Amino acid sequence: MGNNNNNLTTSWGAPVGDNQNSITAGSRGPTLIQDVHLLEKLAHFNRERVPERVVHAKGAGAHGYFEVTNDVTKYTKADFLSEVGKRTPLFIRFSTVAGENGSADTVRDPRGFAVKFYTEEGNYDIVGNNTPIFFIRDAIKFPDFIHTQKRHPQTHLKNPTAVWDFWSLSPESLHQVTYLMGDRGIPATFRHMHGFGSHTFKWTNKDGDGVWIKYHFKTEQGVKNLHPDVATKIAGENPDYHTEDLFNAIENKDFPAWKLYVQIMPLEDANTYRFDPFDVTKTWSQKDYPLIEVGRMVLDRNPENYFAEVEQATFSPGTLVPGVDVSPDKMLQGRLFAYHDAHRYRVGANHQALPINRPRTDVKNYQRDGQMRFDDNGKGSVYYEPNSYNGPTESPENKQASFPVSGIAESVAYDHNDHYTQAGDLYRLMSKEEQDRIVQTIVNEMTPVEKEEIKVRQIGHFYKADPDFGTRIAKGLGLEVPQEVK
Ligand code: HEM
């Protein structure tokens, strides 16, 4: 069956007689409600938007593949990493964090780096950023933090006072703030930045032995950043600059690539390492845990439809495969709830069945029905478990790796409060010119803050990271470093 002609049809497949003129009562009369094609067209148009992502709303995506280049089977039984040379198709979405869908690409902001691997054992998502750390380390602070990054409820303007108020009262943010205010805060393109899983994850091998790991995607294009003045100019001239760059590079067959590495920490080291390795505001020293190569990611195909593929893509750090587990990182634990919940709200209960999200393996379970159930819904197959009809059953060898727990259940903070050493190290690592730029950037960003006490509190944090850093920022703002931090 099918219409072998080029006739325009309604959404119910019937040919349309006129798509340019609505049916009116006489040439000057009112429009008739019986023009059902018009009604359908207007009604569907009204429903063209799904809610944008509450964070990371502006983004660009691409298809590609991952190829294993090093044998890591002694660390993980993950099937997609089981053999050197094995290739797995993937989809990636890059994004900014705070701006709305349609906001400018070249702003100072972390960049999202979300990868969906379509493995033979189901989908695996690494939902990271272009920074190895984050501003906070407990999920309970995330909604407050994001409120400060979004618009003021009355003025609907961005609000630097809220941003610095929150950061100055949350000193665990200092490392990420230093990273963000430095040159890497504005990447030249999505292709010229690294990606990180940021959190600590756990790999388990086929004997059940585990290790803690951190993911690092290193760009083969080299790291390049934009000077803030250039970035501001581009934001006005071409707000979609990064989106366009990625699309054109792939269209011109200049396929961007990244090498994937992991840092590996023996499980027992987590009890004795000099800070908590699950605290996402810290990096692990590469001297202690060097990078081990895993494979190579290449992006070689553009989406054919932005909405279907990029907007409807749903990534979650809880989309895991056997051989990869989570860690007790308090941010990661909260994210395990937040993402699928957001997807059910934003895209719907059956979002995982959409072509971009659907695993390349068969999905066999007893979940049925729900809005927009557009596949065969399991037809007449058995729809409950346990059953006597040969329905799919669990495979105990794929249980999540077990782990010991101890202690008293209560609301507790990470007990390590050195927020300063790694932020200071980062400042000291910068060239003299980059130090000049970061000081100037911070002075510019903090100047509009309304309350002096917020500026003074934040200067204290920069000073504790490095006296030169804090003193120069204080000077730039025409203020003193508070006596008690000296
Ligand atoms: C997107 C929540 C921390 C990276 C999102 C979304 C939510 C969310 C609700 C929108 C999802 C959607 O509508 O599809 C949270 C919460 C966090 C947290 C509650 C802390 C507890 C982080 C961290 C990272 C990160 C630490 C990076 C290491 C991303 C990325 C996206 C995203 C890359 C965009 C995914 C895409 O392209 O669709 N986050 N987030 N988030 N988040 Fe987070």
Image: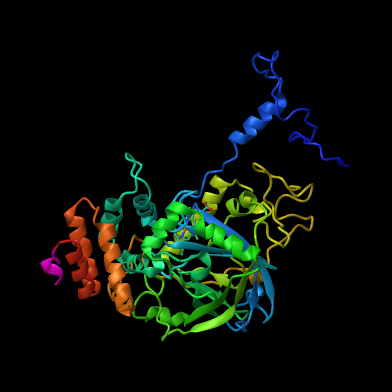
Q: Quadrant of residue 232?
A: bottom left
Q: Quadrant of the C terminus?
A: bottom left
User: Which residue ends up furthest to the left in the rendered image?
Assistant: 483
Would you say 441 lies left or right of 143 here? left
- Residue shown at the point (29%, 77%) measured from the top left: 432
**Foreground residue among 8 and 33:** 8
**Foreground residue among 181 and 68:** 181
Label count reads: 0
Q: Quadrant of residue 456?
A: bottom left
Whether the magenta-drawn stretch holds residue 19 is answered as: no
- Residue shown at the point (38%, 49%) measured from the top left: 150
**Foreground residue among 271 and 174:** 174
- Residue shown at the point (34%, 48%) measured from the top left: 158
Q: Is residue 462 above or below residue 84?
A: above
- Relative image position of residue 154 (x, y in whole percent): 32, 39
- Relative image position of residue 396 (x, y in whole percent): 65, 69
- Relative image position of residue 403 (x, y in whole percent): 50, 72
Q: Quick check: can you spot residue 214?
A: yes
- Relative image position of residue 435 (x, y in whole percent): 29, 73
Q: Quick check: can you spot residue 92?
A: no
Give the magenta range: 480-486
